[in-house]
Amino acid sequence: MHANSTDRGRITARVTAYAQQLIEQAAQMTATTTNQFVAQAALREAERVIEEHSTIHLSIRDAQRFLDAIDNPQPIPDRLAASLRNHLEARQHDTGSRPSSIRWNPKPR
């Protein structure tokens, strides 16, 4: 989903009276409106969650094994190479041009 910086959306939430009081107090302390405060806090948390879920954390040992595998890849098994060739040939036949690369888009969970 792509949005222009001028596009606007609306989010509403029901909170307890206590939560509303604290949010309003914090908004006053930061010289923002309640809406601005909530939107900014939600945006910061959304960015944090996305970053957390987009990062893979590895131990030093696992990171080294990963880098070694990239630097020294295992040879492609014959059956996989044959399957890939068949796929590329079928794709060339369907599109009329030979692809220079293969795109793989994993399905979302």
Image (tube, rainbow, N blue to C red):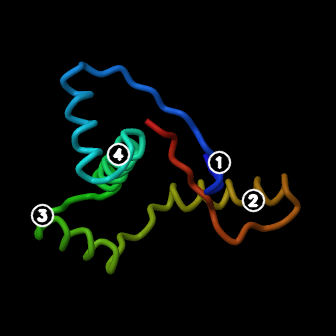
State the SS at label 1: loop
Badge 2: few (under 14), some or many (20 or more) residues near its Cα, within 10 Å? some
The kind of residue on which mark 3 rests is Ser
- Which residue is labeled 3 in the image? 59
Say whether disc 2 or disc 3 marks the residue closer to the N-terminus.
Answer: 3
Residue name at image x 45 percent, y 27 percent: 12
Looking at the picture, how far across and down is residue 37, in whole percent? 35, 45
Q: CA distance from mark 2 to mark 1?
A: 45 Å
Residue at position x 12%, y 64% in the image? 59
Nearest to viewer (mark 2 / mark 1): 1
Pointer 1 local density, CA inside 10 Å: few below 14, some 14–19, many at least 20: few
Task: Please state which of the two labelled residues, at mark 4 or mark 3, is closer to the viewer.
Answer: 4
4 vs 2, front mark: 4
How far separated are the C-alphas under marks 2 and 3?
Answer: 41 Å
Mark 4 to mark 2: distance in Å? Answer: 56 Å
Q: Which mark is residue 89?
A: 2
The residue that mark 1 highlights is: 7
Residue at 80% across / 60% down in the picture? Answer: 92
27 left or right, relative to 60: right
